[in-house]
Amino acid sequence: MSGPEPVVRTVNLVKIYQTGGVPVTAVDGVDLRVDPGEFVAIMGPSGSGKSTLVHMLGGLDTRTSGEIWLDGKRVDTLSESAWAVLRRDKVGFVFQFFNLVANMTVADNVELPALLSGATPRQARERREYLLGALGLAERADASPAQLAGGEQQRVALARALANKPSLLLADEPTGNLDSRNTRDVLRLLGEVHRDGQTIIMVTHDARVASLADRVVSLLDGQIVDDGAIPRPVRRPRGGAGDVVELRS
Amino acid sequence: MRLPLLALLAKEPAHGYELKQALEQTFGGAYPSPNIGQIYVTLGRLEKDGLVRAVDVEQSNRPNKKVYYLTAAGRERLETWVDEPSEGPRVRDEFFMKLVLAPLTGVADRMALINRQRRHYLGQMRELNELAAATDPANRVAHLLVEGAMMHLQADLDWLQRCQEEMA
Ligand SMILES: Nc1ncnc2c1ncn2[C@@H]1O[C@H](COP(=O)(O)OP(=O)(O)O)[C@@H](O)[C@H]1O
Ligand SMILES: [Mg+2]
């Protein structure tokens, strides 16, 4: 073992669902290592096990076998209450369902995780203002979640997930409901927090989002079939990357 | 570049350098900016085909400059171009040829080809993201071009995934 302590490490991680008659192997022996500050995109066809994998990494789903380590600590054996503490302190989530607290304003939804993890009210407010501002939601701070469109709720969920500067941000299709302008705001914010050192694991089929990542992990039938760096542009084109457009035509 | 030049000349007569500037302003960084030599070569061909004419305009202390204007034949050619539907992009994908043929010859396996291609597309998408970020927000034409390129790339990636599901 070399290098820094990984934020996430899994060893031969397996999930088998046994709801109906036939067992379904959703995740089939995944070995994954994510170092501090890395941004990893997880891609793969529908049903390839992406959601199951990130749910297990966040303790929302139990593993069938294998190991999960977060920040050097074995976590697949933790109780639900221990997981709850871990999530409060270390893991931010954005999932396809936004589960915002319905009877709290947008601002309170975003500040809550920061407060719970020990930030002062002032720190929590400043962080909230920054995040909502970056996502084009400053105006919506006093709204209640029910008053928001789907894409707005999704961005609030992202702001909330980032509120306590978690050591790990987990996201499952966080741009699924966004139009292209809102996607741009989300991209910009993700780029910013990533530059500030945020570790991110994100399931996405949106290539614009995935292309921000350092690495892409491809799943097929519950297995990792590719894991490698996304190439950086070789030339920094002076007259604009003009021929990029021509390349594609 | 022939038809865009005709279109610019339909607005008003111009000399080569003005046409270069107009192209750059209109399309921004999203379109390869032609060098002035290419523009003069193209104008020469358009002139030979009778689609534009040039007049020499005298300038004090400097060589004459050639100002180009559209002929009736040029306008007709432009109208025909605008009127006819344009071909959409098709899959004439060199990658697909490799994907289908390579394993037959034992040169490469499909999974590896697809994985490498995916990363390559994502690298291209990263370039487009950077291009969009570097492009003046007010230049909607340039942004639409970039957005179109991104959508094509997304379709290529989706298709790659289908190939992986079916063939790898
Ligand atoms: N709660 C569940 N019960 C039974 N099967 C499930 C459950 N969740 C997911 N699966 C199955 O596990 C496989 C992987 O699903 P999922 O992780 O949601 O894939 P993805 O997110 O890549 O679309 C699929 O075959 C899916 O039907
Ligand atoms: Mg899913």
Image (tube, coloured by chain):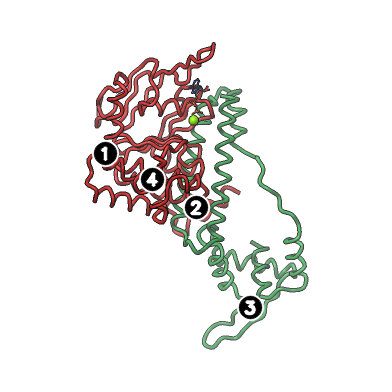
Q: CA distance from mark 1 to mark 4?
A: 23 Å
Q: Tell which tag, 1 or 3, sits nearer the viewer.
A: 1
- The answer to whether dots 2 and 4 both sit on one chain is yes
Which amino acid type is shown beneath numbered disc 3?
Val
Neighbourhood count class around disc 2 (C-alpha, 10 Å): few under 14, some 14–19, many 20 upward = few
Q: CA distance from mark 1 to mark 3?
A: 71 Å
The hue used for chain A is red
Mark nearer the N terminus (2 vs 4): 2
Residue B156 falls in which quadrant of the image?
top right
Residue A38: x and y in percent read 33, 37
Residue A176: x and y in percent read 50, 40
Which amino acid type is shown beneath numbered disc 4?
Leu
Residue lying farthest top?
A: A21
Q: Tell which tag, 3 or 4, sits nearer the viewer.
A: 4
Q: Tell which tag, 2 or 1, sits nearer the viewer.
A: 1
The hue used for chain B is green
Residue A205: x and y in percent read 50, 37
| Residue at (34, 20) in percent of width and height | A11
- The answer to whether dots 3 and 4 both sit on one chain is no
Q: Chain of mark 2?
A: A
Q: Helix, strand or loop at disc 4?
A: helix
Q: Chain of mark 4?
A: A
Q: Is residue A217 left or right of residue B84?
A: left
| Residue at (65, 40) in percent of width and height | B92
Provide the residue designation for mark 4: A190
When the figure is inspected, residue A187 is found, relative to residue B77, above or below; the finding is above
Q: Nearer the viewer, residue B50 or A70?
A: A70
Q: Which mark is residue A116?
A: 1
Mark nearer the N terminus (1 vs 4): 1
Q: Which mark is residue A181?
A: 2
- The answer to whether dots 1 and 3 both sit on one chain is no
Q: Nearer the viewer, residue B65 or A21?
A: A21
